[in-house]
Amino acid sequence: MAELDFERRLERLFGQAPDLGDAQAFAERVERRLDRGWTARRWLIGAAGLAGGLIFASQLLMSNIFERVQSAEQSAKVLGQGLSRVTPTTDMVSALSGGYGVWIAVGLAVVTMGFAVSRVIEEI
Amino acid sequence: MSGALQSSLASLHDVELCSYAAAGERRAFGELVRRHGSGVRGLLRRMGAQAAEADDTAQDAFLAAFERIAEFRGEGTFAGWVKKIAARQYLRRIQRDKRATAIAAEGVDDEADGSAGDADHRIDLDEALKGLSPAERLCVSMCYGAGLSHGEAAEALNLPLGTVKSHVKRGLEKLRARLAPVSEAKTGGAVLEGRRGNG
């Protein structure tokens, strides 16, 4: 029993934190290191995203995407004309086939970018 | 996190702070460091680390704890969890520096038998630990400060279980003699076997 009491006492003594004068400074050092780690991680993710974006853009340009979009628009027009024969009033299809599709896609991309930027600002 | 919540971090329980930290809130983790930093640094010093080394190891331990905060389920105390991380980090550090072998090799000699003399007055734990050999000090601190079992300590130290038990037993005997009140010291305490002997 005496052994147990002593061991408990020892655990209590070990549990008592010493009064270190620079406790606040120590906590601030740890927080700074945490912040540095997160900043580095953010930059790394940002750099990876930028590199990925550049590769994506260069691939788009190299694959003659604009010519393909034009031919796709032509196809959409033909498809729209075919559909208009089946259902005379399809405003949406005609809007898409009239070149608005690209603008809608651009609009959606801008909204997505805005969302992403707001998230990044919030994170910072 | 809202400004109101931010200002009330100090009033939150450790478990709540851990859940905020797990969500990436670094200020909540900073509050945990403020609360338990001294305890962790104190443990490392008691294990035998110099002040600067203890601070470096404690910083590394807290950073590792933040990375692994999702693993903390609140089953024990946060302080106990971080202390275990810190103790293992300190051991890795001394093993890397090849100091562990030297510490383990010595310590069988009773070069610092503090059982007499100091028993006439109570001294604090830090002073009492100075009377232990480095190996005894390390083993006792790991088992009673960081909460490791003898088996865990033996594994972490890469020592046979019997050796660790022996270090702990000797360390406890010395500490008991040094820390015991006058009356108990005079009558002589029973030999401590240690209740952590479950491997």
Image (cartoon, coloured by chain):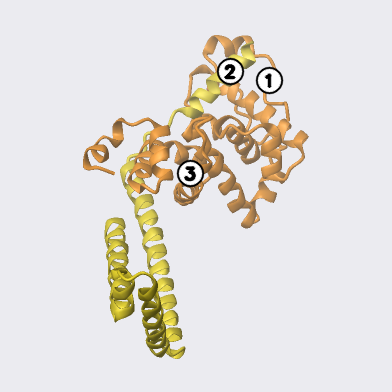
Q: Amino acid at mark 2?
A: Phe
Label 3 or label 1, whichever comes before in sequence order: 3
| Hue used for the chain lettered A | yellow
Where is residue B118 drawn, in percent x and y? 53, 23
Residue placed most toward the observer, B27 or B94:
B27
Chain of the residue on which disc 2 is drawn: A
Where is residue A102 drawn, in percent x and y? 32, 77
Chain of the residue on which disc 1 is drawn: B
Do labels 1 and 2 touch, CB within 8 Å? yes
Residue B69: mark: 3
Residue depth check, mark 3 versus mark 1: number of the one nearer the observer: 3
Relative to A79, residue B36 above or below: above
Residue ID for mark 2: A6
Find the distance from the CA under tag 1 to the CA under tag 2: 9 Å
Q: Is residue B11 left or right of residue A4?
A: left
Where is residue A78 drawn, in percent x and y? 39, 83
Residue ID for mark 1: B192
Q: Residue at x 64, y 16 (%)?
A: A3
Q: Is residue A79 left or right of residue B163?
A: left
Find the distance from the CA under tag 3 to the CA under tag 2: 33 Å
